[in-house]
Image: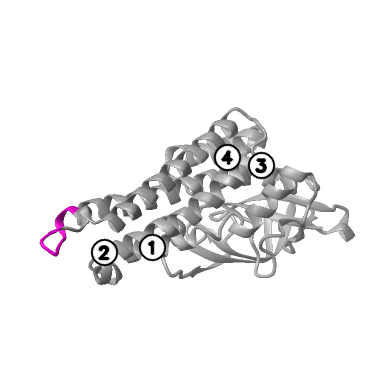
Amino acid sequence: MIADHGNECHCNKFLPGLLSGDKIGCSANTEPNVGSSASEIQTSAYLDGDSWVINGTKTFITNGEFADYVSVAVQFDRSKGSKGIGMILVDRNETSFESKRIHLLGLKGGDLAELAELHFDDLRVPKENLIVPPGEGYKHKMVGFHTWRCFVAVHANSIAEKALEHSLKYVKERQQFGKPIGSFQLIQKLLADMKTDLDISKLLAYRALDMVTKGKNSRLESSMAKQFATEMAVRVTSNAIQIHGAYGLTTEFPLERLYRNAKILTIPEGTSQIQKLIMGRELTGMSAFK
């Protein structure tokens, strides 16, 4: 967002640290009362002299606990001269704010595990940190979602692939009735379904990412990739647990962890149900959101 929409000041101030890896960024959109309906955010901002004053709460923010820079989606206070959604960059070292980590059932080793709730109480941010002006924020956030949905799909594919790899290894080693369980027909059916699901999901994700890279309209394709991949990962990890039997339920094997991680991915960047509504809208031209 900074590279595409920021001015020279934004690029000079924020990009060097992000590109070198010395700084970590995050995007703050979801709120306690606003999830799927991103256009109804309540976090507000108004201009007071040379500063934007931000008030509100963001929740389930990836990297929110330790991010140096936060891109905050705000609703500008129309009673004070501006209206519509925009984006303001917050430098935590410049203007600190309260954050509290949120613990999840999975993803405890990193990635989406570091979710946090952020509280902005009359937070004053330099006027020049405005990156998306009032009224243009919703459009920019929707464009970003296409890319993020592809990233979630790739993450889901990785989880499913690990579950399949563990299962293939296990069925060759585990003996029952005097032979490896991999020779049993029902086990082979599960493995065949898992592999087919995974490859379909990879192709959907690669197509969506290719379209995003080329700047093409990918609303339908990115939603298809995200919805299919995350639900596929739940199916594949569940089948992997079934193949491992009681061992799959223990923490000594990685399957229960992969299953929990997969389930989480069906929620962020739009739930599976929201993705289907987006697909339906793209196919029919009629929105179910209104």
**Amino acid tagged 4:** Lys
Q: Earlier in the sequence, mark 4 or mark 3?
A: 4
Q: Quadrant of residue 80?
A: bottom right
Q: Which residue is mark 4?
A: 13
Q: Pointer 3: what residue?
A: 219
Residue drawn at 65 percent across, 53 percent down: 276
Instruction: List x then y, in percent, for residue 59.
Output: 59, 65
- Marks 1 and 3 sit apart, C-alpha to C-alpha, by 29 Å
Q: Residues within 10 Å of mark 1 (few under 14, many from 20)?
A: many
Residue 201 location (% of width, % of height): 47, 44
Is 20 left, or right, of 8 in this rendering?
A: left
Residue depicted at x 77% and y 57% = 289
Report the residue marked by disc 1: 238
Which residue is the extreme one toward the left?
178
Q: Earlier in the sequence, mark 2 or mark 3?
A: 3
Q: Nearer the viewer, residue 264 or 285?
A: 285
Figure quadrant of the N terminus: top right
Mark 1 falls on what kind of element?
helix
Sequence order check, earlier mark of 1 and 3: 3
Magenta stretch: give its range. 172-179
Marked residue nearer the N-terminal end (1 or 4):
4
